[in-house]
Image (spheres, rainbow, N blue to C red):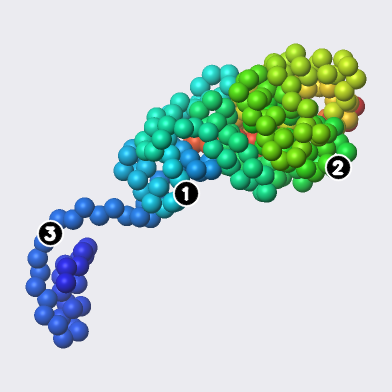
Amino acid sequence: LALPVTDLDAAVSLIRGLGMEAIPGSARFEVRDPYVRIPYDLAGSIALLRDGGPDEAETVMARHPSVRTVYLTRGIEGGFRTPDLVLLSGPDDPVTIVREDGFEIEVDVRNTYFSPRLAHERGRVVSLARPGETVVDMFCGVGPFSLHLARRGCRVHAVDLNPIAVDLARRNAARNGLSDRIEVHHGDAREVVPRLAAGGLRADRIVMNHPTAALGFLDSALAAIARGTIHLYLMVERDGLDAAIGRVRGRLAGRNAGIRPHQVRSVSPAGDQWCLDIDVRM
């Protein structure tokens, strides 16, 4: 019987104390800990590793038999927030179906932005909405926020500049039987939202899920809301929340509004993702 030990003398003493003979020896083994922590996300049949290589991909696929493709994510690129992916294992097919809270969401993990880690946050926002609200989803991506809000009974205007995301958002609305409650608009939210407002749209709720750029679109959101709530997502440095709230207040153009900060998730040792729920009163 060969046993790996960290304290040879203690192990020999223990075995001999049980009335058995113990002969110390040595051997080198390659041991792969099946419980070693590998940072990754699951999106349907695709695993997205934040670190690692082919060995880690093999471990993840062993843990999750439904995973057919594993990519390494090397950051987010460009205005469409699409990931830089390296194929580690399986077919190079970035399209999959994500099942979230009863929805089937078609996702292209290479050409659109989608974060399975925001599922809880989507649930939080939806819990605040009321049936009958008019909602603008300013950076809708493939439509996960829009789907949740439409099922809640809201009328949703979903906007995105990425044509692939817009196509998938429309398909996801149809796939989940919500096309009658979700109108998808292709274009820059800075142009689309004020145009909708000029046509008479008054939003009760606006979702601005673009943490690196949303603040620059706040004036467009304010043009479309009289009273209601704006969910503004930001990346905030550690100990920088007060300064971030100050920057937002400076962009409110004198509107009477309260701000309720909510920490969404920790992103890095340097900062976190926050949602500022801005309650616009007039």
Q: Quadrant of residue 232?
A: top right
Position of the N terminus by quadrant? bottom left
Image coords of residue 30 (percent x, y): 21, 52
Image coords of residue 68 (percent x, y): 44, 43
Residue 244 in view of the camera: no
Residue 163 drawn above or below residue 63: above
Q: Which mark is residue 131?
A: 2
Residues at marks 3 and 1, CA–CA distance in whole angstroms: 36 Å
Observer-side mark, 3 or 1, equals 1
Image point (39%, 32%), residue name: 87
SS of the residue at dot 1?
Answer: loop
Specify few, some or many for label 2: CA neighbours under 10 Å numbering under 14, 14-19, or 20 or more.
few
Specify few, some or many for label 3: CA neighbours under 10 Å numbering under 14, 14-19, or 20 or more.
few
Locate residue 12 relative to residue 204 in the image: left or right: left
Sequence-wise, which precedes: disc 1 or disc 2? 1
SS of the residue at dot 2?
Answer: loop
**Residue position for label 1:** 66
Q: Which mark is residue 92?
A: none
Q: Quadrant of residue 206?
A: top right
Image point (82%, 14%), residue name: 195
Q: Amino acid at mark 1?
A: Ser
Q: Amino acid at mark 3?
A: Ala
Residue 16 drawn above or below residue 198: below
Residues at marks 1 and 2, CA–CA distance in whole angstroms: 36 Å
Image coords of residue 57 (percent x, y): 37, 42
Sequence-wise, which precedes: disc 3 or disc 1? 3
Position of the C terminus by quadrant? top right
Sequence-wise, which precedes: disc 3 or disc 2? 3
Residue 227 drawn above or below residue 266: above
**Residue position for label 3:** 27
Locate residue 99 relative to residue 223 in the image: left or right: left
Image point (40%, 47%), residue name: 60
